[in-house]
Image (tube, helix red, strand yellow):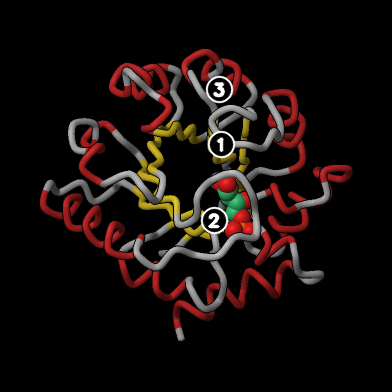
Amino acid sequence: MIKIAPSILSADFAKLGAEVAEVEAGGADWIHVDVMDGHFVPNITLGPPIVNAIQHYTALPLDVHLMIEQPERYIADFAKAGAKVITVHAEACTHLHRVVHMIKELGVQAGVAINPGTPASVLREVLPDLDLVLVMTVNPGFGGQTFIPRTLQKIREIRQSLNEASLLDVHIEVDGGVTVETAPLVANAGADVLVAGSAVFGQSNRALAISQIRGSIRG
Ligand code: DX5
Ligand code: ZN
């Protein structure tokens, strides 16, 4: 079962409550929250108070993607703000194993993200501890970028590693450039959670946008 996680990065920040409520009514499975610090990525977005505010407007799991340096400094704040999943970047963690376990000890699902230039092999030692692997299909920092096709091979490789280790509950999430054209490709490669920013919030009818992405996978 494929999950669609609209990214609020492409929503109207002046009415986030209404925006998340609209995609929930439109059939979204998770709400993807992109946190950027202006250091790990060039852009700055939002922090724990915004996560805390939007949790009152949706019952969907809040899937928090930390594109920040030293994420261990903020994990407890995001957990307290209502994050259901917290994903950190492997590239941002000197002590990745420790950070993953910090997340789990807070009762939150733990994810690790890897950039397009990072091989899947960096995940090997923490894979059994993870709830989610996030394969970046663009370089993080901005919405509306073009999908990088070479990442499909990495998705296949991670799905194979999970299968070989019988880690069948670990999600593979993809983030960046997901459209009705690329959704079937990533789903076939083994992704089961699809983040979509501009493909959902860039459309006036969000329910239709979500159902078209789902339809593109089935079709
Ligand atoms: C990229 C962010 C993505 C982004 C996806 O830095 O992590 O979540 O919002 O946007 P689209 O779907 O527009 O590529
Ligand atoms: Zn993201």
- Residue 121 position within the rendered picture, expressed as x and y whole percent measured from the top left: 20, 42
Q: Secondary structure at mark 1?
A: strand
- Residue 199 position within the rendered picture, expressed as x and y whole percent measured from the top left: 65, 66
- Up-down: is 191 above or below 179? above
Tag 1–tag 3 contact (CB < 8 Å)? no
- Residue 99 position within the rendered picture, expressed as x and y whole percent measured from the top left: 37, 20
Give the class, few, some or many, for how many residues have Cα within 10 Å of label 2's Cα (few <14, many ≥20): many
User: Which amino acid does the dot numbered 1 rest on?
Assistant: Val
**What residue is disc 1 on?**
64
Q: Going 35% across and 24% down the picture, which residue do you hit?
A: 100
Give the class, few, some or many, for how many residues have Cα within 10 Å of label 1's Cα (few <14, many ≥20): many
- Up-down: is 129 above or below 140? above
Question: In this image, 114 relative to 6: left or right?
Answer: left
Tag 2–tag 3 contact (CB < 8 Å)? no
**What residue is disc 3 on?**
79
Q: Which mark is residue 195?
A: 2
User: Which amino acid does the dot numbered 2 rest on?
Assistant: Val
First in sequence, mark 2 or 1: give its number: 1
User: Which amino acid does the dot numbered 3 rest on?
Assistant: Ala
Of badges 1 and 3, the one in the foreground is 1
